[in-house]
Amino acid sequence: MDRVARDVVESAAAVLEGSATRSARVEGQYLPPLGWSGVDEPAKAAWEKRYPALRAEFLASPWASYRDRVNLRSEDLAENFWNAYRSVKGGRTTDFDVGAMQKEIFAIAAESLSSDAKDIQDVRGWPAVLADDLFSYPEVWQLQADKAMTKEAFLAEAKQSPSDDLRAFAVGQERIAEYGKKPLDLHFTGLDGREIDLEKLRGKVVMIDIWATTCAVCIDNMPRAKELYDKYRSKGFEAISIALDREEDRQKVLNILKKHEIQWPQFLDTKQDSVARFGVVSVPVVLVVDRNGFIVADIRGGGTEQFEPLIRKYLDL
């Protein structure tokens, strides 16, 4: 495969594969890859037919870097997972092998850490992202419980992984489980100077929204979150947000909050302590805390559909 062919395939990969993170995180709804508006549909169909063979040839060629292989391998796994998820949610059968996905996650983690390639720093987080998919959307996993590792076994192996991100994910998941056994302790000084202590909010149902200015889905969710806040605040509902941004992004955070008229307390977590504490691999992450201070729901990946039913449930409405 010559260099021109390599460039063509790489460009096609970027368009056809899209971003797995972009595609995966809207409650299982696969967003179409970027670049297809106004496309000649017959030409697109013809290219899609040729693409798998060209892609395979590219990956087997000396032009394919280790980073290329890790990226495409991981994106394939993510896309196959979400295809299976959509099948399950639609009431259709799927032959997706969760056990094989689990093994592949650990294999990618081990191989990427053992490589001396200098261009793979940005792909080493893939195993943790894929693991987060499995834990955040367990419907596929539950169908194959007899063929896959249990969550406990998976986390035990993840804690021994050479991947820092995968180990952090496992520790975070265990901490989340512990929070179901004791009230959550959380206190901070908000961007507006308010002192927030979750213990003082006992008796209220609290939504904790973990977001970032780089997360389009997080920002898209704000109008719906505000609507629910305004609707249920008088009934005992409160909200708190944690922005995973740098100090230099403070004004950007404030501008977004002003635009969406967000009034509840905001914490700028410049040290990223919430990442390890809550096992955050990607945002948004929304935690629901009941009147007694226990985390009773952990919503990851985007969609706001679950918010109101949970709020009503724990407000006893």
Image (cartoon, helix red, strand yellow):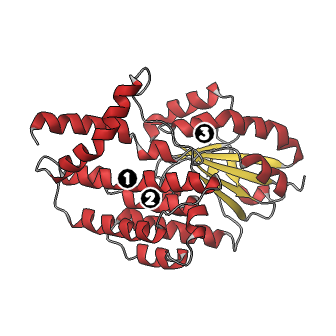
* Residue 130: numbered disc: 2
Closer-to-camera residue (231/39): 39
Q: Work out how far the residue at label 3 is from the one at label 1, CA to CA, in angstroms.
A: 41 Å
Q: Amino acid at mark 3?
A: Leu
Q: Is residue 260 left or right of residue 106?
A: right
Relative to 25, residue 109 above or below: below
> x and y percent of residue 67 in the render?
23, 51
Residue 208 can be seen in this image: yes
Nearer mark to the viewer, of 3 and 1: 1
Q: Is residue 69 left or right of residue 100?
A: left
Under tag 1, what secondary structure? helix
Residue 13 can be seen in this image: no
Q: The N terminus is located in which quarter?
A: top left
> x and y percent of residue 317 in the render?
90, 52
Relative to 161, residue 77 above or below: above
Query: In percent of the image, x 61 and y 56: which residue is there?
Result: 92
Q: Amino acid at mark 1?
A: Asp
Query: In percent of the image, x 44 and y 65: which residue is there?
Result: 168
* Residue 76: numbered disc: 1
Q: Are marks 3 and 2 in contact (CB under 8 Å)?
A: no
Within-10-Å neighbours for mark 1: few <14, some 14–19, many 20+: some
Q: Work out how far the residue at label 3 is from the one at label 2, CA to CA, in angstroms.
A: 33 Å
Under tag 2, what secondary structure? helix
Under tag 3, what secondary structure? loop
Q: Which residue is mark 3?
A: 191
